[in-house]
Amino acid sequence: MLVILTKAVVGPYRSINTAQSVDIDPNVTVLVGMNEAGKTVFLKALHKANDAQGKESFNPTDDYPRRHLTTYLRSHEDDPVAAVEFTYRPTKAEITKANQTFSCDLPDDFSFKVIHNYANNKLVTISVAEASAIAALQNKPGLSSDAGKALSESKTIREAHTKLGQIDLTEADSAFAEALKKRIDACPWQGSILSYEIWRHFSVSIPKFLYFSDYDLLPGKMNLADLKSRVTALKNDPSKKALIEPKHLSILALLRIAGVDLDDFDGKTTYEEMRAKVEGVSINLTDKVLEFWKQNEDLEVEVDIRPDATDVTPFDNGPNLYLRIKNRRHRGVTTPFDQRSRGFIWFFSFLVWFDSVRDQLASSGVDASSNLILLLDEPGLALHALAQEDFLNYIDELSKAHQVVYTTHSPFMVRSERLHQVRIVEDKADVGTTVSDNLSGSDPRTIFPLQAALGWSVAQNLFISKTNLLVEGVSELAYLQTMSSILSAGGETGLDGNTTVVPVGGLSNVATFTSLLGANGLSIALLLDYSGRQDQKLESLIHQKLIQKKSVFNVSQFRDMKKVGQDTVPSDIEDLFTVKLYLTYFNKAFAKQLNGVSITEQDLPQGDRIVQRIEKFLVSKGIELKPSGGFNHYTVAATFSTSPSVKVDAATKARFSALFSAINRQLE
């Protein structure tokens, strides 16, 4: 992915009466809502705005909200409104490349917007300062001092060209001015030349959308003569689009990737030859499916092409293509493709569709390897709960190359450790469809899948109590439970035994867990790392009164015993240990990788956070403890929890005791 979609503002569009601004996750975005809430409407709006296959477009009569359609049509021709607005952010690597190519100074968080309106036109909002580019132009070899002065007095490329036209130019100056004029003439915009050039540079990498739903599933059989007549009729009269249904497109996709043309069925090519081609593709696709389909790995797709004069119309005329599922577990018994194992059929049909679309796009010059966003409407709906876990793994695999947006109302299609990827879709009276990441005001029926997903995760990992301490991860869980046991055994203050420590999988999930658990009347306190400033989502929770400010703790408040309860310096849970004690367990945890060498505090660079200091040291010494860099924090926590044989120093005990005392008082 070279350019990432970060936000979509959708509406007015069908049931979305007022524009809905939705943050899009760089990997996977999950739309959760009840039936008819508007999940499909949202996906369709994205698809129509920038369809990879170029078949979709906005039509006010079909797409504008009906309640306001008559009023809108009066102004549509002169002032078509926006249907969708996208915000894109290039990757850091692409921004660096653009800065080098255009001698500009785009920041790492550079973004731009594209509006798609009901006239199917694009309006681009992009702003690039030209100062850096002008400064680079001044270094052009051979320019006269007068030309250099003209450039230094200019803020834009247009102004630079104008000033150059007001002075006497050398031959080199004239050639330079002509080059600027060509850049200006090539820009159809009235404003910044560089903004247009940057837009042109990134626009070719903007991802387009592909939409897939249950309507695109492969059928069990199809008459090929009937299919050919429909395709021919559509070619002769493009208005007859209704002749080609999704099932026809699915079979055409299968034939396309098998290299079989409908004209091949004119008798010159034997059915066996064509069957071999289609079957070869089917075997290849089945192998791909079985990488993720773990429910029954003895399934395979069997292909047959033959006529049957005894069948009903149209299957009694010419060759039929039959797809059947063979189950090797039951002695090779086959059943029609569309009569069983619907989850397997979804997988197989999606792969046929996806491979076919990518082939078509590649043949037209589109880079389908990365410039696609996949829109999946209720994927895996017919799958068993555990099979949906297989499908989530497949979505994760897809998201390595493509952003994925999918809809669901199944709790097993939501990863409880990634609730920050969830967007709630509701149909509200007099408002229409709304899309939000705010759970606090959501209908309990809408957020039920999230509560169920959370409940499933909790059931697999821990119990929820009436009083709960939410922490970011399992490292905090390990440290807090172990230190509580050590302190309690020594007659000092540990965590109240009635309080459960709940790891929520990262700061991004804290808000979601707080909303879901708090809605059930449970007492909650939060213990978080501290970056030096309050998290925006956390402030929103406090502002919405979903949690009291006094119930939110961060570890920096317990580092300095003279300032207990006050925010101090950026801190992680590891900073409650003295540096010497933490390094003792770090060296023990990674003794093998460190070849017995012990790291001391004197080896580390200065800094507030022990974890960051160690990671900088590892980089400086070229020590790799993890392929992605840094080290596994939980490895140290686990070492401490399983073998707390080293005497814990008084300073560490005092910090944890102060922490537990504060939390116990709050959760009383």
Image: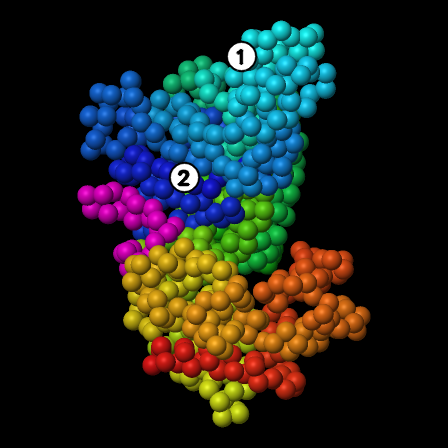
Name the residue located 22 percent from the left edge and 28 percent from the top edge. Answer: 69
Q: Is residue 667 visible?
A: yes
Mark 2 crowdedness (10 Å alpha carbons): few <14, some 14-19, many ≥20? many
Splitting the image into 4 quarters, where does residue 55 fall?
A: top left
Q: Amino acid at mark 1?
A: Thr
Question: From the image, which quarter does the C terminus lie in?
Answer: bottom left
Q: Position of residue 136 (x, y in %)?
A: 64, 26
Q: Is residue 323 magenta?
A: no
Q: Is residue 226 visible?
A: no
Q: Which residues are magenta?
A: 423-445
User: Could you say whether the residue bearing mark 1 is in a helix, strand or loop?
Assistant: helix
- First in sequence: mark 2 or mark 1? 2
The front one of 40 and 68 is 68
Percent x, y of residue 564: 45, 75
Residue 435 included in the magenta stretch of the image: yes
The foreground one among 551 and 262 is 551
Q: Which of 95/4 is in front?
A: 95
Above or below 308: residue 541: below
Residue at x 60% of width, y 15% of height: 180
Residue on which disc 1 sits: 162
Q: CA distance from mark 2 to mark 1?
A: 39 Å
Q: How many marks?
A: 2
User: What kind of residue is marked 2?
Assistant: Ala
- Which mark lies nearer to you, 2 or 1? 1
Residue at the spot of label 2: 8
On the picture, is 154 further left or further right than 215? Answer: right
Which dot marks residue 212? Answer: none
Q: Foreground residue, 362 or 128?
A: 128
Residue that appears at 52% across and 17% down: 159
Residue 350 higher or lower than 505, as above or below: above
Which residue: 56% across, 81% down? Answer: 651
The image shows residue 328, relative to residue 271, as above or below, that is below
